[in-house]
Amino acid sequence: MERFGTLSFGHYGPLGGGRQLTAADSMHQAIDLAQGMDELGVNGAYFRVHHFARQQASPMPLLAAIAARTRRIEVGTGVIDMRYENPLYLAEEAAAVDLISDGRLALGVSRGSPESVVRGYEAFGYTGSQDPRGADIAREHFDLFLRAIEGEGLAERDANSPFGGGTGLQRIEPHSPGLRSRVWWGAGNRDSAEWAGRVGVNLMSSTLLTAADGRPFDLLQAEQIDGFRAAWRDAGHAGTPRVSVSRSIFPITTAEDEMYFGGRQDGDQIGVIDGIRSTFGKTYAAAPDVLVEQLKDDAAIAAADTLMLTIPSQLGVEFNLRVVESFAKYVAPELGWRSTLA
């Protein structure tokens, strides 16, 4: 593990006791937290995307705002649901954010996670899927998106246009030359990860895996990462792809930490997602020295270059920044972390 950041689900709504976290609160707090993390040398701030839910759903304005208020931290998604996306509009937006951030965008995309509505992407106008979960739409959209950010000409120029004219095919603008190398595919199984390796994009390994054969989650995930890297090599891609994993990790350093997370450490969980038995990773919550030893034994964290900490964003900026700072100060250096301030 060389880098770490936070993965926020961006929840908002009632907090209990008459308190309310609004969508505006959630976004402003995300910007403030990212600024604080940038000053600590944390490597990334990443956001889940869920439609028809009280969560972040349109990440590009938020990422652009964070990019404009920070200097070093990577801004990204984990992940955008490609079933809902116009591929060419997403290519324009992603290129703009990448340019605003001076190449700090880490764009995670995939088929998306289970929804709170039935085939919500059809309400966005994307119909005709032959797959009950819309995976075919997601892959088709992703293919066109990649072609667009690679600079392929996609629309015939109008020779009679008063705005330049010409002949041949025109690419999408703006174009960010390095964006293709900063695209990630979110994978919840080995087949999807190997497909990402063949395509030549980075891997965001999911918070769950659609496998449950009795082996621990970290070993299943490490095997998935190995398969991805082998597929990358076999496809002949140059360079070294990046790989991220996410975990719920809480260094307990105060009485407040103990109140919220003491006793929360648990083992892997087995559940059913989209009708498939799946394995969910454990929560780590302990004193920093205990966490160091536990995390050194996590095979997937050892195999990945980037660790995303899932954070309880509803608890506010001050609390989450203290959790991140405790991890940066007491735990991450023992795992090989490289601060952006170094």
Image: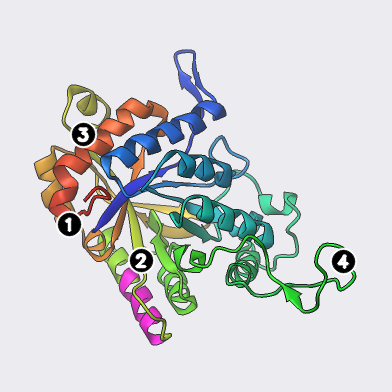
Q: Depth-wise, is mark 4 or mark 1 nearer the camera? A: 4
Structural distance between the alpha carbons of marks 4 and 1? 56 Å
- Which of pointers 4 and 1 lies earlier in the amino acid sequence? 4
Check the image and name the residue furthest to the right.
160
Res. 216 in view: no
Residue 2, quarter of picture: bottom left
Spot occupied by residue 112 in the image (x, y as percentages of width and height): 54, 56
| Front-most of residues 115 and 322 | 322
How many numbered marks are there? 4
The magenta segment: 225-234
- Which of pointers 4 and 2 lies earlier in the amino acid sequence? 4
Q: Which amino acid does label 3 sit on?
A: Gly
| Front-most of residues 202 and 341 | 341
Spot occupied by residue 94 in the image (x, y as percentages of width and height): 57, 56
Q: Assess disc 1: are there few (<14), some (14-19) or many (≥20) residues with their C-alpha within 10 Å of its C-alpha.
A: few
Structural distance between the alpha carbons of marks 1 and 3? 27 Å
Structural distance between the alpha carbons of marks 4 and 2? 43 Å
At 52% across and 67% down in the image, what residue appears? Answer: 177
Q: Residue 263 got which mark?
A: 3
Q: Assess disc 4: are there few (<14), some (14-19) or many (≥20) residues with their C-alpha within 10 Å of its C-alpha.
A: few
Q: What residue type is labelled 1?
A: Gly
Spot occupied by residue 96 in the image (x, y as percentages of width and height): 58, 54
Quadrant where the N terminus is found in the figure: bottom left
Structural distance between the alpha carbons of marks 1 and 2? 16 Å
- Which of pointers 1 and 2 lies earlier in the amino acid sequence? 2
Spot occupied by residue 282 in the image (x, y as percentages of width and height): 28, 48
Q: Residue 242 got which mark?
A: 2
Residue linked to disc 4: 161
Q: Which amino acid does label 4 sit on?
A: Ser
Q: Depth-wise, is mark 2 or mark 3 nearer the camera? A: 2
At 49% across and 57% down in the image, what residue appears? Answer: 107
Q: Assess disc 2: are there few (<14), some (14-19) or many (≥20) residues with their C-alpha within 10 Å of its C-alpha.
A: some
